[in-house]
């Protein structure tokens, strides 16, 4: 339940939203939504001779990945009656998803910076394309958020941003021998009991060893040491960092969505739309409703 409360706080949803599907209201836990599968001439979006094409393609790739990882974080949950072994599994899996999210988010911010610097005024034009005043406000707010965080995330000097720390230290690759040796030396022998690295493995009769929980702990300790500060403050800092990363993800997704809509509009890209239906996890539905309520309040 503690892990459930932590995840609910991170994702800004109620604890009930994260309960197993069978506990949710209604006989069928799945939700459906109307969708359209659009087809268009890709050459009109990615013109080979235009300087926006390559950074736009990179930005769309990275945004797709962070959108997927955010979805996995939202639907991942710990059963209310989870055993200690299940808790260790979920904690490790959530940590892995967040490390990947930070890594792809860092790459997306780099592609965003490239596009913003190369194509002056393009992103500003895109936030003026929406027809309704409400959408224009939303688009402008998202662009301001991403631009304000860009310099912090990609900074090469001074204190590195949390997203950059995770990406460079334990995200797409694993720490070098020097950093790993320093972490092990510090947390195997030179710390008090609360900071000492615990040896944990999760094994079952069906999976064998299903999780090297001790390696999850090593990665967390490395991030904590890099962030600095008192060890008792790290849990709070970590939660705040996750919340800020998820907010930045939503802003970036909005920016890219409005940018694509802008291209379709100004270039008169003809699209063929086939109506369709997609199934959506109930926790995704709850998160969407929360976002809508927040936008209405602001």
Image (cartoon, helix red, strand yellow):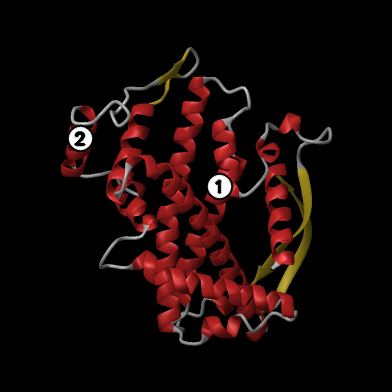
- Choose between 134 and 130: the one closer to the eye: 134
Residue at coordinates 52% horizontally, 65% vertically from top-left? Answer: 60
- Which x, y percent locates residue 188? 22, 28
- Which x, y percent locates residue 196? 28, 28
Q: Is residue 113 left or right of residue 38?
A: left
Q: Which mark, residue 10?
A: 1
Q: Is residue 56 left or right of residue 15?
A: left
Compute the Cα span from label 1 to label 2.
29 Å
The residue labelled by disc 2 is: 186
**Image quadrant where residue 231 sits:** top left
Q: Is residue 189 left or right of residue 74?
A: left
Q: Residue furthest right?
A: 26
| Residue neighbourhood size for the residue with mark 2, other residues' Cα within 10 Å, grouped as few (<14), some (14–19), many (≥20) | some
Label 1 element class: helix
Q: Is residue 23 above or below residue 113?
A: above
- Which x, y percent locates residue 77? 59, 35
Residue at coordinates 71% horizontally, 73% vertically from top-left? Answer: 271
Q: Is residue 61 left or right of residue 110?
A: right
Q: Is residue 179 above or below residue 4?
A: below
């Amino acid at each position: 339940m503690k892990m459930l409360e932590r995840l609910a706080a991170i994702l800004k949803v109620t604890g009930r939203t994260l309960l197993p599907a069978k506990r949710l209201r209604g006989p069928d836990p799945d939700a459906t939504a109307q969708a359209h599968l659009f087809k268009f001439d890709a050459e009109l979006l990615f013109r080979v001779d235009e300087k926006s094409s390559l950074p736009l393609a990179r930005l769309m790739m990275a945004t797709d990945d962070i959108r997927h990882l955010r979805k996995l974080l939202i639907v991942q949950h710990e059963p209310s009656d989870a055993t200690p072994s299940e808790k260790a599994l979920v904690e490790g899996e959530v940590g892995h998803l967040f490390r990947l999210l930070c890594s792809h988010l860092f790459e997306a911010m780099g592609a965003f910076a490239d596009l913003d610097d190369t194509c002056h005024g393009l992103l500003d034009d895109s936030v003026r394309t929406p027809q309704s005043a409400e959408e224009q406000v939303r688009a402008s707010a998202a662009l301001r958020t991403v631009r304000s965080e860009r310099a912090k995330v990609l900074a090469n000097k001074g204190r590195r941003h949390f997203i950059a720390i995770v990406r460079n230290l334990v995200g797409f690759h694993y720490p070098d021998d020097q950093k790993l040796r320093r972490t092990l030396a510090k947390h195997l022998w030179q710390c008090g009991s609360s900071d000492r690295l615990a040896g944990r493995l999760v094994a079952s009769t069906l999976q064998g060893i299903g999780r090297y929980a001790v390696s999850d702990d090593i990665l967390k300790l490395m991030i904590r040491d890099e962030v600095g500060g008192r060890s008792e403050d790290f849990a709070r800092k970590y939660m705040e960092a996750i919340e800020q990363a998820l907010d930045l993800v939503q802003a970036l997704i909005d920016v890219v969505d409005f940018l694509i809509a802008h291209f379709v509009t100004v270039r008169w890209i003809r699209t063929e739309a086939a109506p369709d239906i997609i199934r959506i996890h109930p926790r995704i539905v709850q998160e969407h409703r929360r976002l809508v309520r927040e936008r209405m309040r602001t």
